[in-house]
Image (cartoon, grey):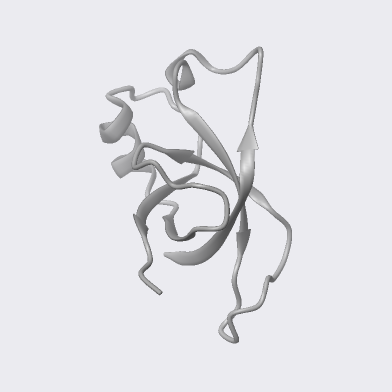
Amino acid sequence: MQMALIQGTATSTVKHPSLDGVRLLICQFLGSNGKVSGDPVLAIDKIGARRGDKVILTSDGKGLRELLNDDTCPARWWTLGIADD
């Protein structure tokens, strides 16, 4: 699991069928000092996170496939929770 900051959303006209109707978020990982670290990633969102929210991301592929009810999903990161301030 990783803490990340939501930078915005991504729109795609062509994507894997398992991602139809799913929100894609642009997320920037946060280092241990709370500052932005590394390159941004795309994450699947089913909990309603918004720009500026700090979220907990996970790369649990099995959990994501269960969440989307699709064993062919190629995505890696997804929002597990929104962090309180």
Q: Residue at x 54, y 62 (%)?
A: 4
> Can you name the residue that lies furthest to the bottom here?
33
Q: Say whether residue 67 is left or right of residue 72.
A: left
Q: Residue at x 48, y 13 (%)?
A: 17
Q: Quadrant of residue 25?
A: top right
Query: Measured from the top left, where is residue 22 in percent x and y?
Result: 45, 25
* Res. 60 in view: yes
Above or below: residue 74 compared with residue 60:
above
Q: Residue at x 50, y 58 (%)?
A: 53
Q: Quadrant of residue 64?
A: top left
Query: Measured from the top left, where is residue 16 in percent x and y?
Result: 54, 17
Q: Residue at x 57, y 50 (%)?
A: 51
Query: Measured from the top left, where is residue 47 in percent x and y?
Result: 34, 42
Front residue of 15 and 85: 85
Q: Say whether residue 44 is left or right of residue 83.
A: right
User: The C terminus appears in which quarter of the rendering?
Assistant: bottom left
User: The N terminus appears in which quarter of the rendering?
Assistant: bottom left
Q: Number of numbered discs present?
A: 0
> Can you name the residue that lies furthest to the right here?
39
Q: Say whether residue 12 is left or right of residue 71.
A: right
Above or below: residue 54 compared with residue 66:
below
* Res. 74 in view: no
